[in-house]
Amino acid sequence: MNQPISLSDEMNQYMSKGTCPRCGVVILSPEYIRQHDAAMRAAVLSNWSKGPILRSIVPMLATDALTPAGAIVARSRGDELQCLTCQKSWNFYRTSNLNPAQRFTSQYGTPGIAGYKRQAFGQPAVPNYTAAFRGLSTPAATTINVAGYRLKSIKDEQQIEAVLRTEKKTYPNNSKGRVTPKVSLTDSVTRSVTIESNSVKASGGQAGIQILGFAAIQGQIQQQLSQRNAVQTQQTLTFSEEIQVEVPPHSTIELTITWKLIWLKGTAILGPLVGLARVEVPYFVPHRLTFDWSTRDVPLTKQRNK
Protein backbone atom coordinates (compact mmCIF):
# COMPACT_ATOMS: atom_id res chain seq x y z
CA MET A 1 0.00 0.00 0.00
CA ASN A 2 2.98 2.33 0.62
CA GLN A 3 4.36 1.76 -2.88
CA PRO A 4 2.87 3.56 -5.90
CA ILE A 5 0.80 1.43 -8.22
CA SER A 6 2.80 0.04 -11.12
CA LEU A 7 0.84 -1.96 -13.67
CA SER A 8 2.36 -5.04 -15.24
CA ASP A 9 3.35 -4.88 -18.92
CA GLU A 10 0.55 -7.34 -19.69
CA MET A 11 -2.06 -5.15 -17.98
CA ASN A 12 -0.78 -2.05 -19.76
CA GLN A 13 -1.21 -3.85 -23.09
CA TYR A 14 -4.72 -4.95 -22.21
CA MET A 15 -5.82 -1.45 -21.14
CA SER A 16 -4.19 0.37 -24.07
CA LYS A 17 -4.79 -2.06 -26.96
CA GLY A 18 -7.67 -4.22 -25.70
CA THR A 19 -5.88 -7.43 -26.67
CA CYS A 20 -4.99 -10.50 -24.64
CA PRO A 21 -1.27 -10.23 -23.75
CA ARG A 22 -1.00 -14.03 -24.03
CA CYS A 23 -2.67 -14.94 -27.34
CA GLY A 24 -3.31 -11.53 -28.93
CA VAL A 25 -7.07 -11.97 -29.44
CA VAL A 26 -9.04 -8.70 -29.46
CA ILE A 27 -11.13 -8.43 -26.29
CA LEU A 28 -11.99 -4.72 -26.11
CA SER A 29 -12.62 -2.57 -29.18
CA PRO A 30 -10.63 0.66 -29.72
CA GLU A 31 -13.90 2.58 -29.32
CA TYR A 32 -14.57 0.94 -25.96
CA ILE A 33 -11.05 1.78 -24.77
CA ARG A 34 -11.48 5.43 -25.78
CA GLN A 35 -14.81 5.70 -23.99
CA HIS A 36 -13.90 3.76 -20.84
CA ASP A 37 -10.23 4.57 -20.26
CA ALA A 38 -11.00 6.56 -17.10
CA ALA A 39 -13.42 3.90 -15.82
CA MET A 40 -10.84 1.12 -16.31
CA ARG A 41 -8.19 3.07 -14.41
CA ALA A 42 -10.71 3.82 -11.66
CA ALA A 43 -11.41 0.08 -11.42
CA VAL A 44 -7.68 -0.62 -11.01
CA LEU A 45 -7.39 2.03 -8.28
CA SER A 46 -10.50 0.71 -6.54
CA ASN A 47 -9.12 -2.82 -6.66
CA TRP A 48 -5.78 -1.68 -5.19
CA SER A 49 -7.47 0.27 -2.38
CA LYS A 50 -9.12 -2.91 -1.06
CA GLY A 51 -5.79 -4.13 0.29
CA PRO A 52 -4.25 -7.58 -0.14
CA ILE A 53 -6.76 -9.55 1.96
CA LEU A 54 -9.92 -8.22 0.31
CA ARG A 55 -8.35 -8.42 -3.13
CA SER A 56 -7.56 -12.07 -2.62
CA ILE A 57 -11.23 -12.92 -2.10
CA VAL A 58 -12.78 -10.80 -4.87
CA PRO A 59 -15.39 -13.04 -6.54
CA MET A 60 -14.28 -14.56 -9.84
CA LEU A 61 -17.47 -13.28 -11.47
CA ALA A 62 -16.84 -9.64 -10.52
CA THR A 63 -17.78 -7.33 -13.39
CA ASP A 64 -16.55 -3.77 -13.92
CA ALA A 65 -15.08 -1.67 -16.72
CA LEU A 66 -12.16 -4.11 -16.99
CA THR A 67 -14.48 -7.05 -17.66
CA PRO A 68 -17.58 -5.67 -19.45
CA ALA A 69 -20.53 -7.94 -20.04
CA GLY A 70 -20.07 -10.07 -23.16
CA ALA A 71 -16.29 -9.60 -23.34
CA ILE A 72 -14.18 -12.76 -23.56
CA VAL A 73 -12.40 -11.98 -20.29
CA ALA A 74 -13.08 -12.61 -16.59
CA ARG A 75 -11.53 -12.23 -13.16
CA SER A 76 -9.60 -15.38 -12.29
CA ARG A 77 -8.48 -13.97 -8.93
CA GLY A 78 -8.62 -10.61 -7.23
CA ASP A 79 -5.47 -9.35 -8.95
CA GLU A 80 -5.77 -11.28 -12.22
CA LEU A 81 -7.70 -11.28 -15.47
CA GLN A 82 -8.18 -14.39 -17.59
CA CYS A 83 -8.64 -14.54 -21.37
CA LEU A 84 -11.55 -16.89 -22.13
CA THR A 85 -10.05 -17.74 -25.53
CA CYS A 86 -6.65 -19.09 -24.49
CA GLN A 87 -7.59 -19.58 -20.79
CA LYS A 88 -4.37 -17.84 -19.68
CA SER A 89 -4.17 -15.15 -16.98
CA TRP A 90 -2.10 -12.08 -16.19
CA ASN A 91 -1.61 -9.98 -13.06
CA PHE A 92 -2.76 -6.38 -12.66
CA TYR A 93 0.44 -5.23 -11.01
CA ARG A 94 4.19 -5.70 -11.23
CA THR A 95 5.52 -8.24 -8.75
CA SER A 96 7.61 -5.50 -7.11
CA ASN A 97 4.38 -3.86 -5.93
CA LEU A 98 3.36 -6.91 -3.93
CA ASN A 99 4.43 -7.70 -0.39
CA PRO A 100 5.49 -11.28 0.48
CA ALA A 101 1.94 -12.30 1.41
CA GLN A 102 0.56 -10.96 -1.85
CA ARG A 103 3.27 -12.70 -3.87
CA PHE A 104 2.40 -15.94 -2.08
CA THR A 105 -1.29 -15.46 -2.93
CA SER A 106 -0.45 -14.49 -6.51
CA GLN A 107 1.58 -17.68 -6.96
CA TYR A 108 -0.46 -20.20 -4.97
CA GLY A 109 -3.91 -18.71 -4.39
CA THR A 110 -5.72 -17.94 -1.16
CA PRO A 111 -4.44 -19.88 1.89
CA GLY A 112 -6.96 -22.23 3.44
CA ILE A 113 -8.33 -23.60 0.16
CA ALA A 114 -8.09 -27.37 -0.10
CA GLY A 115 -5.56 -28.78 -2.55
CA TYR A 116 -1.78 -28.67 -2.19
CA LYS A 117 1.43 -29.03 -4.17
CA ARG A 118 4.98 -29.56 -2.86
CA GLN A 119 7.83 -27.29 -3.83
CA ALA A 120 10.51 -29.94 -3.32
CA PHE A 121 11.01 -33.27 -1.59
CA GLY A 122 10.74 -32.86 2.16
CA GLN A 123 9.16 -29.38 1.99
CA PRO A 124 5.73 -28.80 3.58
CA ALA A 125 2.75 -28.63 1.24
CA VAL A 126 1.40 -25.24 0.21
CA PRO A 127 -2.09 -24.43 -1.11
CA ASN A 128 -2.58 -25.21 -4.78
CA TYR A 129 -5.22 -22.93 -6.25
CA THR A 130 -5.41 -24.80 -9.56
CA ALA A 131 -6.00 -28.17 -7.91
CA ALA A 132 -8.57 -26.70 -5.54
CA PHE A 133 -10.69 -25.32 -8.36
CA ARG A 134 -10.17 -28.07 -10.93
CA GLY A 135 -13.59 -28.63 -12.48
CA LEU A 136 -14.77 -25.21 -11.28
CA SER A 137 -12.57 -23.10 -13.56
CA THR A 138 -14.01 -20.64 -16.02
CA PRO A 139 -15.54 -22.58 -18.94
CA ALA A 140 -14.30 -22.33 -22.49
CA ALA A 141 -15.30 -19.18 -24.32
CA THR A 142 -18.96 -19.09 -25.39
CA THR A 143 -18.81 -15.56 -26.82
CA ILE A 144 -16.63 -13.75 -29.33
CA ASN A 145 -16.49 -9.96 -29.33
CA VAL A 146 -15.79 -8.89 -32.91
CA ALA A 147 -15.95 -5.11 -32.31
CA GLY A 148 -12.30 -4.75 -33.33
CA TYR A 149 -12.31 -7.23 -36.23
CA ARG A 150 -11.65 -6.45 -39.90
CA LEU A 151 -11.92 -8.22 -43.26
CA LYS A 152 -9.16 -10.83 -43.59
CA SER A 153 -10.09 -12.90 -46.64
CA ILE A 154 -12.90 -14.28 -48.82
CA LYS A 155 -13.93 -17.88 -49.43
CA ASP A 156 -16.61 -19.86 -51.30
CA GLU A 157 -17.21 -17.08 -53.83
CA GLN A 158 -19.62 -18.14 -56.56
CA GLN A 159 -22.38 -16.86 -58.86
CA ILE A 160 -26.00 -17.75 -58.15
CA GLU A 161 -29.11 -16.96 -60.16
CA ALA A 162 -32.39 -15.64 -58.73
CA VAL A 163 -35.65 -14.76 -60.50
CA LEU A 164 -36.67 -11.14 -59.91
CA ARG A 165 -40.10 -11.12 -61.59
CA THR A 166 -42.10 -12.24 -64.61
CA GLU A 167 -43.85 -9.94 -67.06
CA LYS A 168 -46.44 -10.81 -69.72
CA LYS A 169 -47.50 -8.79 -72.76
CA THR A 170 -49.86 -9.60 -75.65
CA TYR A 171 -49.40 -8.55 -79.29
CA PRO A 172 -52.51 -8.89 -81.52
CA ASN A 173 -52.35 -8.97 -85.31
CA ASN A 174 -55.65 -8.40 -87.17
CA SER A 175 -54.03 -8.09 -90.56
CA LYS A 176 -53.58 -10.68 -93.30
CA GLY A 177 -49.79 -10.61 -93.10
CA ARG A 178 -47.23 -11.41 -90.43
CA VAL A 179 -45.93 -8.63 -88.19
CA THR A 180 -42.69 -8.52 -86.18
CA PRO A 181 -42.93 -5.85 -83.50
CA LYS A 182 -39.77 -4.76 -81.73
CA VAL A 183 -39.86 -4.95 -77.95
CA SER A 184 -37.52 -2.86 -75.81
CA LEU A 185 -36.53 -4.43 -72.51
CA THR A 186 -35.01 -2.30 -69.77
CA ASP A 187 -34.49 -2.92 -66.06
CA SER A 188 -32.15 -1.79 -63.28
CA VAL A 189 -31.28 -2.59 -59.68
CA THR A 190 -29.25 -0.77 -57.05
CA ARG A 191 -25.83 -2.39 -56.70
CA SER A 192 -24.83 -2.62 -53.07
CA VAL A 193 -23.28 -5.19 -50.74
CA THR A 194 -25.75 -7.11 -48.60
CA ILE A 195 -24.43 -8.75 -45.44
CA GLU A 196 -26.38 -11.45 -43.61
CA SER A 197 -25.60 -10.13 -40.14
CA ASN A 198 -27.86 -12.72 -38.49
CA SER A 199 -25.74 -15.52 -39.99
CA VAL A 200 -22.38 -14.57 -38.47
CA LYS A 201 -20.72 -17.68 -37.03
CA ALA A 202 -17.40 -18.79 -35.60
CA SER A 203 -14.93 -19.95 -38.23
CA GLY A 204 -14.46 -23.70 -38.42
CA GLY A 205 -18.10 -24.53 -37.72
CA GLN A 206 -17.77 -24.44 -33.92
CA ALA A 207 -21.29 -24.45 -32.51
CA GLY A 208 -22.70 -22.67 -29.47
CA ILE A 209 -20.63 -19.49 -29.90
CA GLN A 210 -22.40 -16.16 -29.40
CA ILE A 211 -21.05 -13.35 -31.59
CA LEU A 212 -21.03 -9.88 -30.01
CA GLY A 213 -20.15 -6.43 -31.33
CA PHE A 214 -20.86 -7.05 -35.03
CA ALA A 215 -23.14 -4.00 -35.33
CA ALA A 216 -20.15 -1.79 -34.50
CA ILE A 217 -18.16 -3.02 -37.53
CA GLN A 218 -20.89 -3.87 -40.05
CA GLY A 219 -20.54 -0.57 -41.91
CA GLN A 220 -16.77 -0.95 -42.06
CA ILE A 221 -17.01 -4.51 -43.42
CA GLN A 222 -19.58 -3.43 -46.04
CA GLN A 223 -17.22 -0.66 -47.14
CA GLN A 224 -14.29 -3.08 -47.43
CA LEU A 225 -16.38 -5.54 -49.45
CA SER A 226 -17.65 -2.68 -51.65
CA GLN A 227 -14.09 -1.60 -52.41
CA ARG A 228 -13.10 -5.17 -53.20
CA ASN A 229 -15.99 -5.59 -55.63
CA ALA A 230 -15.72 -2.07 -57.10
CA VAL A 231 -19.19 -1.16 -55.84
CA GLN A 232 -19.78 2.59 -55.67
CA THR A 233 -22.30 4.40 -53.48
CA GLN A 234 -25.79 4.50 -55.03
CA GLN A 235 -24.50 2.64 -58.09
CA THR A 236 -27.18 1.24 -60.44
CA LEU A 237 -26.88 -1.94 -62.45
CA THR A 238 -28.81 -1.39 -65.72
CA PHE A 239 -29.74 -3.73 -68.56
CA SER A 240 -31.28 -2.75 -71.88
CA GLU A 241 -31.97 -4.85 -74.99
CA GLU A 242 -34.36 -5.06 -77.91
CA ILE A 243 -36.01 -8.23 -79.23
CA GLN A 244 -38.45 -9.03 -82.07
CA VAL A 245 -41.47 -11.29 -81.86
CA GLU A 246 -43.34 -12.72 -84.85
CA VAL A 247 -47.14 -12.56 -84.84
CA PRO A 248 -48.98 -14.60 -87.52
CA PRO A 249 -52.02 -13.13 -89.36
CA HIS A 250 -55.27 -12.88 -87.40
CA SER A 251 -53.73 -14.09 -84.16
CA THR A 252 -52.35 -12.90 -80.88
CA ILE A 253 -49.02 -13.77 -79.33
CA GLU A 254 -48.35 -13.63 -75.58
CA LEU A 255 -44.78 -12.69 -74.68
CA THR A 256 -43.44 -13.84 -71.29
CA ILE A 257 -40.32 -12.16 -69.92
CA THR A 258 -38.56 -13.57 -66.85
CA TRP A 259 -36.08 -11.15 -65.32
CA LYS A 260 -33.14 -12.68 -63.45
CA LEU A 261 -30.36 -11.31 -61.31
CA ILE A 262 -26.97 -13.01 -61.10
CA TRP A 263 -25.59 -12.55 -57.59
CA LEU A 264 -22.00 -12.88 -56.47
CA LYS A 265 -22.21 -14.82 -53.22
CA GLY A 266 -19.31 -15.35 -50.83
CA THR A 267 -18.22 -15.68 -47.22
CA ALA A 268 -16.17 -12.95 -45.59
CA ILE A 269 -13.59 -14.09 -43.04
CA LEU A 270 -13.19 -11.54 -40.24
CA GLY A 271 -10.45 -11.50 -37.63
CA PRO A 272 -8.53 -9.29 -35.18
CA LEU A 273 -5.38 -7.38 -36.03
CA VAL A 274 -3.44 -9.89 -33.94
CA GLY A 275 -4.64 -13.38 -33.03
CA LEU A 276 -6.17 -16.46 -34.61
CA ALA A 277 -9.85 -16.12 -33.70
CA ARG A 278 -12.01 -15.83 -36.83
CA VAL A 279 -15.69 -15.46 -37.70
CA GLU A 280 -17.52 -15.91 -41.01
CA VAL A 281 -20.35 -13.82 -42.46
CA PRO A 282 -22.17 -14.45 -45.79
CA TYR A 283 -22.55 -11.56 -48.24
CA PHE A 284 -24.18 -10.93 -51.63
CA VAL A 285 -23.42 -8.44 -54.42
CA PRO A 286 -25.61 -7.90 -57.54
CA HIS A 287 -23.41 -8.92 -60.46
CA ARG A 288 -25.45 -8.98 -63.68
CA LEU A 289 -29.03 -8.57 -64.95
CA THR A 290 -30.38 -10.96 -67.56
CA PHE A 291 -33.69 -12.38 -68.81
CA ASP A 292 -35.37 -15.30 -70.54
CA TRP A 293 -38.31 -14.91 -72.92
CA SER A 294 -40.85 -17.12 -74.63
CA THR A 295 -44.02 -16.74 -76.73
CA ARG A 296 -47.24 -18.65 -77.16
CA ASP A 297 -50.37 -18.36 -79.27
CA VAL A 298 -53.40 -17.05 -77.44
CA PRO A 299 -56.49 -19.16 -78.30
CA LEU A 300 -59.07 -17.45 -80.55
CA THR A 301 -61.79 -17.98 -77.95
CA LYS A 302 -59.72 -16.01 -75.48
CA GLN A 303 -59.36 -13.17 -78.00
CA ARG A 304 -63.14 -12.98 -78.57
CA ASN A 305 -63.76 -12.76 -74.81
CA LYS A 306 -61.50 -9.69 -74.44
Image (tube, rainbow, N blue to C red):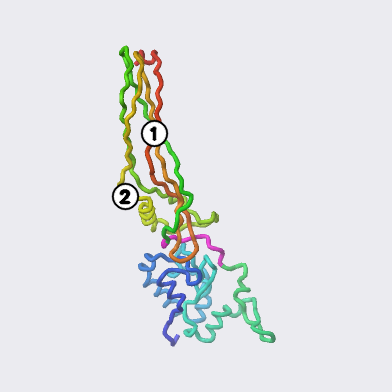
Q: Is residue 141 magenta?
A: yes
Amino acid carrying mark 1 in the image: Phe
Q: Earlier in the sequence, mark 1 or mark 2?
A: 2
How many numbered discs? Answer: 2
Residue 150 placement: quadrant: bottom left
x 40%, y 39%: residue: 261
Q: Main secondary structure of the magenta part?
A: loop
Q: Quadrant of residue 4?
A: bottom left
Q: Quadrant of the N terminus?
A: bottom left
Which one is nearer the viewer's eye here, 244 or 54?
A: 244
Q: Specify the farthest residue to the right.
A: 122
Residues shaded magenta: 138-148
Using residue 176 as the reference point, say whether residue 91 is left or right of it: right
Q: Which residue is mark 1?
A: 291
| Structural crowding at the residue carrying mark 2, measured as other residues with C-alpha within 10 Å and reported as few (<14), some (14–19) or many (≥20) | few
* Location of mark 2 (residue): 232
Which residue is more in the foreground, 163 or 145? 163
Residue at 64%, 76% (x, y): give it: 114
Q: Is residue 123 above or below residue 76?
A: below
Q: Are marks 1 and 2 in contact (CB under 8 Å)?
A: no
Disc number placed over residue 60 in the picture, else none: none
- Is 244 rendered above or below residue 24? above
The secondary structure type at the circle numbered 1 is strand
- Give above or below for 111 relative to 161: below
Could you say where residue 45 lies in the image, as x and y percent from the top left? 42, 78
Q: Position of residue 30 (x, y in %)?
A: 38, 66
Left or right of 258: which side holds 123? right
Indicate the quadrant containing the C terminus: top left, top right, bottom left or bottom right. top left
Residue at image point 39% right, 48% down: 194
